[in-house]
Image (cartoon, rainbow, N blue to C red):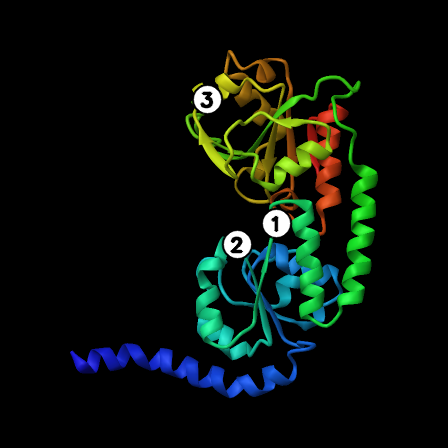
């Protein structure tokens, strides 16, 4: 029994020893870290946008934007990170998001400074970019970039109200569903505590989902109770990406008593950018405005 415990402890001890050996060099570069590890796609986009792509030494398998990020060392997916690879990269600092905050303690135990990026609103994106700049020794450049980003978003943002300035449309944002199931018994939608709330408000709309949660699963009956004016379905670069928009809209028409489906008020926005609150926020906001204010129904980011 003792031998078994020792066997399991060896990898952990080895990690701690290697991490301790790297601590001195990390302390020297703390003011301006040269080796950055990003364990969240949104953080990776922020770092590259701030001109720190050459400092990034490792990313997750989901960090695929910009394309240069895919050339970095892959440390696993967001939820299951290979800590041996992390230690071998000897990062000076690690960026994570709220989605994988469960590994923050483990990273700090290994001696790595950790920055958690927020992505529940545009302001959280801006704040995260400012903190990234501060942590990486480019605070002034980060402030300039964020100021420019805010200027662009403010210019794009719509005034409150619908297309004619009247009552704002009630819009339901669908972030996922089983496209092989015509019953719509489980459709995942964005609630008021997600960053889509911000996008809807800046597009002159309100969220049709009433409960104060980030995301929720609703049944067909739930869809009928909400009866939104417009449905925006987000399609990433995987999964339903190969299904054409006409087919997706036809599936919605199968929900007979859903007003938006029957009137053709279903918009499809394609691309992974719509699933990440980061520096591509203006692009996503433009797509939402096209769907809500200009009647576009097939939008590719």
Q: Which residue is mark 2?
A: 98
Q: Is residue 92 above or below residue 101?
A: below
Whole-Å distance between the Cαs marked 1 and 3?
27 Å
| Residue 297 visible somewhere in the drawing | yes
Q: Residue furthest left?
A: 1
Q: Which residue reaches farthest top? A: 257
- Figure quadrant of residue 285: top right
Left/right placement of residue 127 relative to residue 100 reads right
Where's residue 18, x and y in %? Answer: 47, 84
Image quarter (top left, top right, bottom left or bottom right) of the N terminus = bottom left
- Residue 222, numbered circle: 3
Q: Residue at x 47, y 34 (%)?
A: 216
Tag 3 secondary structure: helix
Q: Are marks 1 and 3 in contact (CB under 8 Å)?
A: no
User: Which dot, 1 or 3, sits closer to the camera?
Assistant: 1
Task: Tell me whether the residue at label 1 lies in contact with that at label 2, contact meaning CB atoms closer than 8 angstroms.
Answer: yes
> Could you say which disc has been placed on residue 27 in the image?
none
Question: Horizontal placement of 240 versus 128: left or right?
Answer: left
Q: Using the numbered discs, state the Cα–Cα distance from disc 1 to disc 2 in whole angstroms.
A: 8 Å
**Nearer the N terminus, badge 3 or badge 2?**
2
Q: Position of residue 234 (x, y in %)?
A: 60, 36
In depth, the one of 247 and 140 nearer the eye is 140
Q: Give the label, 3 or 2, closer to the camera.
A: 2
Q: Of helix, strand and loop, which one carries label 2?
A: helix
Q: Give the CA separation, mark 3 to mark 2.
A: 28 Å
Q: Nearer the viewer, residue 195 or 253?
A: 195
Contact (Cβ within 8 Å) of mark 3 with mark 2: no
Residue occupied by mark 1 = 119
């Amino acid at each position: 029994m003792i031998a078994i415990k020792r066997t399991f402890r060896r990898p952990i001890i080895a990690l701690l020893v290697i991490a301790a050996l790297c601590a001195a060099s990390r302390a020297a570069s703390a003011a301006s870290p040269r080796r950055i590890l990003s364990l969240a796609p949104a953080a990776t986009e922020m770092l590259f946008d701030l001109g720190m792509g050459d400092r990034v030494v490792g990313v997750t398998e989901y960090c695929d934007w910009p394309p240069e990020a895919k050339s970095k060392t892959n440390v696993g997916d967001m939820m299951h990170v290979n800590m041996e690879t992390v230690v071998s990269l000897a990062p000076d600092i690690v960026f994570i998001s709220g989605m994988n905050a469960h590994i923050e303690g483990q990273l700090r135990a290994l001696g790595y400074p950790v920055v958690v990026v927020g992505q529940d609103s545009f302001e959280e994106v801006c704040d995260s970019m400012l903190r990234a700049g501060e942590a990486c020794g480019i605070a002034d450049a980060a402030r300039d970039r964020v100021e420019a980003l805010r200027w662009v978003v403010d210019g794009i943002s719509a005034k409150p109200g619908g297309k004619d300035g009247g009552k704002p449309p009630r819009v339901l944002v669908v972030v996922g569903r089983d496209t092989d199931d015509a019953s719509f018994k489980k459709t995942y939608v964005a609630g008021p505590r997600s960053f889509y709330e911000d996008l809807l408000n800046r597009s002159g709309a309100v969220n049709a989902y009433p409960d104060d949660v980030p995301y929720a699963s609703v049944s067909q009956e739930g869809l009928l109770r909400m009866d939104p004016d417009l449905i925006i379905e987000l399609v990433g670069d995987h999964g339903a990406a190969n299904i054409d928009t006409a087919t997706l809209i036809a599936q919605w028409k199968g929900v007979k008593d859903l007003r938006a489906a029957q009137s053709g008020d279903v918009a499809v926005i394609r691309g992974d950018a719509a699933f990440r609150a980061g520096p591509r926020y203006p692009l996503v906001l433009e797509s939402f405005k096209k769907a809500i204010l200009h009647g576009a129904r097939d939008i590719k980011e």
